[in-house]
Image: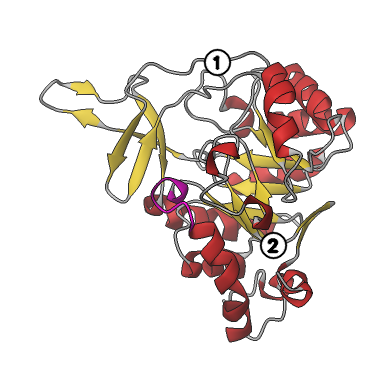
Amino acid sequence: MSTELSTQLETTLGRLTLPNPIMVASGTFGYAREMEHIVDLHRLGGILPKTITAEPRIGNAPWRTVETSAGLLNAIGLDNDGVDAFIEHHLPYLSTLSAPIVVSVAGRTVEDFTELARRVGQCEGVAAIELNLSCPNVSGGIDFGTNADSCQRVVASVREATDTPILAKLTPNVTSIADIAGGAAKGGADAVCLINTVLGMAVDWRKQRPILGNGMGGLSGPAIKPIALRCVHQVRQAVEIPIIGIGGVASLDDVMQFIVTGASAIQIGTANYYDPQLSMRLIDELPAALREIGASSVAEAVGTLKR
């Protein structure tokens, strides 16, 4: 990538600087090694390996995923190897990549989040920590993301434990996501990630049972993009910290919609499953789209939505 191109796409999220705004979302990209023969990992704006917890988790009972109209419903349940295995086996590989590594962590208590962030923040090769405050598939995992005070308390505790940049990933399953984002900002988050999946359900009417083993799960994919855009717009009016847009990104148009609405970067999630090279195309196509609206950088285009 040329110096001119990389400068044009460089994106700042508080104290975190990305070479470009195209990131891959946790839970959809494995630990990155799985994708090394499909995607040029070094070109990505940021890589988020799957969310880690203090102890290994086997996740929820099957079925764990089901396709829906324009989306995917999942109830994986944060299946992961635990923080010890991540630091010992996965982080050494991730640290060899030039793309910024953002580690997603989830806990049941403030202390869980704080200790995970402290340990991960001490590791070489970690550019930022994403706090998964909003997973709908784990008992207790969504509580911190549905109350502004609780969100602020978690973020503030993590902020005291590490100097590593903090991103707070928020749920749309609330009355006012702007209020929750305000709590994250007050707690010291460098940016907020909007949105996690939308709580949903799939039913087999013949068996008269839910299809997912967990009963309910998180809806992702193109179906939730309008909700995600609405959340980005509302939060942009309420807080000054940067926003990362997530939800249904599948094309350059989607990326630009998030940017002009107020997102400084985006994460690709569900599309990684059916179009794993999408991120590479978006990085190539983005400069021309910025020029089309008269912007010479990502920052110039952020939040330019006209009323």
Q: Which residue is mark 2?
A: 20
Q: Which mark is residue 57?
A: 1
Front in this rendered view, residue 69 or 270: 270
Q: Secondary structure at mark 2?
A: loop
Whether residue 169 can be seen here = yes
Q: Quadrant of residue 67?
A: top left
Q: Position of residue 73 (x, y in %)?
A: 36, 37
Whether residue 130 can be seen here = no
Q: Secondary structure at mark 1?
A: loop
Q: Position of residue 260 (x, y in %)?
A: 60, 70
Who comes first in sequence, dot 2 or dot 1?
A: 2
Bounds of the magenta segment: 271-277
Front in this rendered view, residue 179 or 189: 189
Residue appearing at x 48%, y 18% in the figure = 59
Q: CA distance from mark 2 to mark 1?
A: 33 Å
Q: Amino acid at mark 2?
A: Asn
Q: Is residue 276 magenta?
A: yes
Q: Position of residue 213 (x, y in %)?
A: 33, 19
Measured along the vertical axis of the image, is residue 237 above or below residue 306? above
Q: Is residue 283 magenta?
A: no
Does 209 sit left or right of 128 as displayed?
left
Q: Position of residue 99 (x, y in %)?
A: 72, 51
Residue appearing at x 74%, y 24% in the figure = 87
Q: Quadrant of the N terminus?
A: bottom right
Label 2 neighbour load within 10 Å: few <14, some 14-19, many 20+: many
Verify CB contact (< 8 Å) between mark 2 and mark 1.
no
Residue appearing at x 60%, y 14% in the figure = 56
Residue appearing at x 59%, y 80% in the figure = 288
